Amino acid sequence: MLKPEDLKNKKFNKAMRGYDPAEVDKFLEEVRQELTYLYLDNANMKETLERVTGKLEYYQQMENTMQSAL
């Protein structure tokens, strides 16, 4: 998985008639910032999913216990 640090540390070789290094660096910084946001958002969603899954399992067990009691 590509990480924000990978973009921060990426270096390109310079060549004749190549892209403007400042423009490339600016674009890579924008992409790195967006990737950082998405990376953190994904981690938060995984945490939320684990928490909700745990609650669901708890309520499913509670339901099974109530059905057995009836």
Image: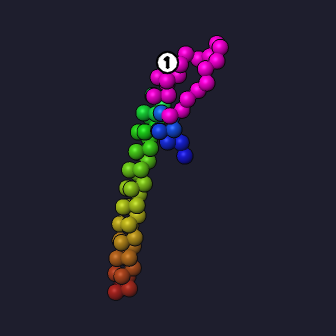
Does 18 lie within the magenta span? yes
Q: Which residue is mark 1?
A: 22
Question: How many circles with numbers are drawn on the protein?
Answer: 1
Q: Is residue 10 above or below residue 17?
A: below
Residue at the extreme bottom of the image, as rendered: 69
At a point 38% along the width and 85% down the height, the residue shown is: 68
Question: Residue drawn 55% across and 29% down?
Answer: 11
Up the image or down, 21 lies above or below 34; here it is above
Q: Is residue 8 or residue 49 the one in the foreground?
A: 8
Tell me: 26 left or right of 52: right
Q: Which stretch is magenta? A: 9-29
For image coordinates 51% across by 38% down, the residue present is: 6
Amino acid at pointer 1: Ala
Query: Foreground: 36 or 51?
Result: 36
Q: Quadrant of residue 56?
A: bottom left
x, y (%) of residue 3?
Answer: 49, 42
